[in-house]
Every structure is written in C-alpha cells, then in structure tokens.
Amino acid sequence: MKKMIGLVLLTVGISLTAGFGAVLSPDFRSATAKAGEVAFADQAVEEARETYCSLREKFKAGPADGCEGSAPLVENTEGLSQLALRSAQLEVLTSGEREVMVIQISQARIQYRLAIKKSMTRWAELESMGTQGPVPRLSGWYSSAGVGFIGGLVLLIAGAWISRKAAAAQGDAEADGPTAEDFGVLLDRVREAVGTLQASMAACSAPTAADLERFKGELEDIQKGDLARLCASGPRVTARHGVEGMASVFSPLSGAERKLNRAWAAMVDKHWPESSVSVVGAVAELDETIAALDAL
C-alpha cells in the first residue's frame, strides 16, 4: 500500500513539475507571441511582393520597386533595424505612386504597401517590449508558476522517499522469510561450490566423456540453485546499498555468471581447455564480488 502511495505521489509530482516548469513568464510569453505575429507579417510582405512583381511581369510593366531586374527598395540596409528598414521601404513605395499602371498592378502595389505597413507596426510593437533579462524572466515565471512547481517538487521528493522506504521494507521482509538467506552467505556458498568444481577439473588431467557429463551436471546444479537466487536478489541489494552499491557487486557477479555459462557451453561442445579457463575466470570474478560486498 505504501509503495502504491509513493508511486502515485511520484507521478503527480513529476507531472506538476514538468507542467509548471514549462510555463513562460507573462512578459516573455507576450514577446514570444508578438514574435510569431511579426513572422507572419513578414511572410505576408514576401507574398505580396511576389504577387506584385509577377503582375508587373505579366502586363510587361517593366521591373521596379525591388522586383527582379530593378534596384532594391532600399539599397543601403547596413545598420538598419527591421523597423527602420520597413519604414524606408514604405516611404519608397509611397513616393512612387505617380506611375501610371493597370488596375491589377495598382491594387497589388497597394496590398504590397499595406503588408509592409502592417509588418512595420508589428516590429514597432515587438521592439517596444524590449529584451527581458534572466532575473526578471525568472521572477515573472515564479509569480505565475512557482508555487505549483514547488508543490510538485515536494510531492516528487515525498513519493520517491516513500517508495524507497517501501521497497526497503519489502526487501527486508523477503530477507526474513523462512526460505531466505543472507546475500553474503549465498555468495560464499557459490564461491565454494565453483572453487570445488574448478579443483576437481584441475585434478582431472585426461577427462572422459563421462567426466564432462559429471562436471556439467555439477555446474548446472550451481547455476540453477544458489547462483540463480543470487542473480534474482538485485532489488534487495539495491534497497539496502543503493544503485551504486548494487552495481559494484553485480558487475563482477554478472561476469562470473557469463563465464560459467561459457564453461557449460564448452562442456556441451566437449571443449575441455575452454571450459577449464572459463571456470577459473568465474572463480576470479566471484572473489571480486566478495571483495566488493565486503567494501560495502
């Protein structure tokens, strides 16, 4: 029950911190929205320009007003802000309205001028907002989402703590069961069994097929018995010694398991040298495991 409560609190805490953490400060949110309006207004300027220039080309009115083949609306743009650039473009289009044009080109030119004027207005609004520094942005975020974020963080920490305690209690309960044994006792017994197997194999200078089958049976008993129980006790070790402690113990232990699996496969293939080397390597890995557990 406590573990379920911890997981619920942890889930709610993660959701709240993620949701409120993604909230923008009011001023920055307004500036971001205004920047989107500016982007759409600039896109409308380009579309209006393309329409205007294509109509001039269609009616053979000749290139002008920055269309292909003519000088740009504003030749020297170095150092100009976007607002100043739009203002200069609008001034050029306004001063050139005396040209006699067909109605379609005239209307397209008006739409082009209006698009530039709208873009200039949006740029003026955006520049008037200024640039918000990190401290005001953080202050604005905290005023609108800080309480919710801190509440979610408290729930997250509480849920993690409760879950950890519940997992530790569950591990202790399993360790105190009628069939449970201490991890160190199991590890010592596996080391002794593998050491005995290694000594028996070393004493057998000319193994027969019957010897291989006998050694393979002894190895299978170790793999299916105490070694399997050791490998399944990872959650208990994690609950007691933490993830780092579990990793320091299970890294050499998993190496020993792999070498014993390799020894079993070599015995099946009747490859005596490889099986002997693998068992010796497993003994060394188990010694490292015992040393790591003693260090904890």
Image (cartoon, helix red, strand yellow):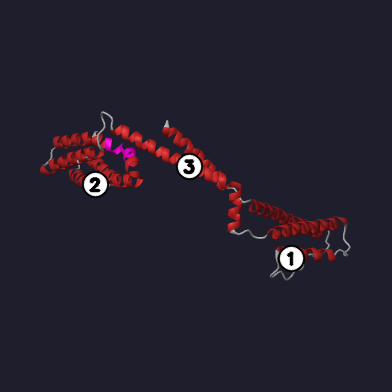
Between 84 and 77, which is closer to the camera in this rendering? 84
State the image quarter where residue 187 is shown. Answer: top left
State the image quarter where residue 275 is shown. Answer: top left
Judging from the image, what secondary structure is the residue with disc 1 in?
A: helix
Pointer 3: what residue?
A: 156
Judging from the image, what secondary structure is the residue with disc 3 in?
A: helix
The residue carrying pointer 3 sits among few (fewer than 14), some (14 to 19) or many (20 or more) residues within 10 Å by Cα, namely many
Name the amino acid type tagged 3: Leu
Does the magenta run of residues contain 230?
yes
Pointer 1: what residue?
A: 84
Give left or right: position of 21 versus 278.
right
Residue drawn at (29%, 34%), measured in percent from left and top? 175
Residue 288 versus residue 174 in the image, above or below: below
Residue 234: give x, y in percent of width and height: 32, 39
Label 3 vs 2, first from the N-terminus: 3
Residue 43: give x, y in percent of width and height: 71, 55
Q: Nearer the viewer, mark 2 or mark 1?
A: 2
Residue 79: give x, y in percent of width and height: 69, 70
Pointer 2: what residue?
A: 294
Residue 182 versus residue 52 in the image, above or below: above
Name the amino acid type tagged 1: Ala
| Residues shaded magenta | 229-237
Residue 285 versus residue 232 in the image, above or below: below
How far apart, in angstroms, are the residues tagged by discs 3 and 2?
A: 33 Å
